[in-house]
Amino acid sequence: MSKRKVTVRMKADYEYEASNLQGNKVDIDMYDAPNKKAQSPMDLLLSALGGCSSVDAVLMMKKKRKTINDFFVEIEGVRNDGIPSYYTHIELKFVLISPDAKEEEFAKVVALSVEKYCSVASSLKSEISYTSEVRRPS
């Protein structure tokens, strides 16, 4: 079993920074549109899902020796009106620009990527546990 660890640290009331053990950092904020400088946690969840499923889809098409002129995935999440405002539905639209790929083969690759290989998609079904502690300043 492999483990990952990320630390999220407060920078200001609505600003946070996430960093992994390798020192890679991601800014996070909860500001509304005019003041937004970074993605919100819910945006990052959609980004993680899109990124995770994209990698496998692209690699599988390359393994099939298909030309990829461009590739992107548009992700839209519909959120619950109450609190918490979790995603009730997430739709991914995969777009491949290729002169030699067939619609059917790309559809199969996308299905495999999302339903079988994407760890983020599978993690949306995972059990979440938590603890808390208060530390005194030194």
Image: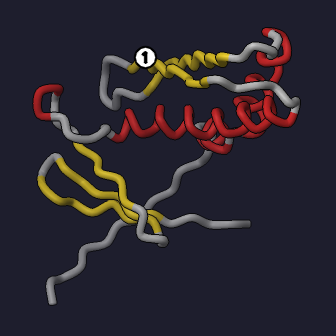
Q: Position of residue 107 (x, y in %)?
A: 77, 15
In the figure, 132 relative to 124: above or below? below
**Quadrant of the frame with the C terminus:** bottom left
In the figure, 137 relative to 27: above or below? below
Tell me the crowding category of disc 1: few under 14, some 14 to 19, or many 20 or more residues within 10 angstroms, Cα based.
few
Query: Quadrant location of residue 94?
Result: top right
Q: Is residue 69 left or right of residue 9?
A: right
| Residue drawn at x 28%, y 47% as measured from the top left | 28
Q: Which residue is under mark 1? A: 78
In the figure, 38 relative to 101: above or below? below
| Residue projecting furthest to the bottom | 138
In the figure, 83 relative to 122: above or below? above
| Residue drawn at x 76%, y 23% as measured from the top left | 111
Q: Position of residue 41 (x, y in %)?
A: 35, 41
Pick the residue in front: 72 or 114. 72
| Residue drawn at x 37%, y 59% as measured from the top left | 25
Pick the residue in front: 32 or 137. 32
**Quadrant of the frame with the N terminus:** bottom right
Query: Quadrant location of residue 65?
Result: top right
Q: In this view, does 21 lie to the left or right of 40?
A: right
Q: Where is residue 43 in the image (x, y as percent from the top left)?
A: 38, 33
The residue type indicated by label 1 comes to: Val
Q: Position of residue 124 (x, y in %)?
A: 58, 38
User: Element at badge 1?
Assistant: strand
Q: Is residue 8 left or right of residue 46?
A: left
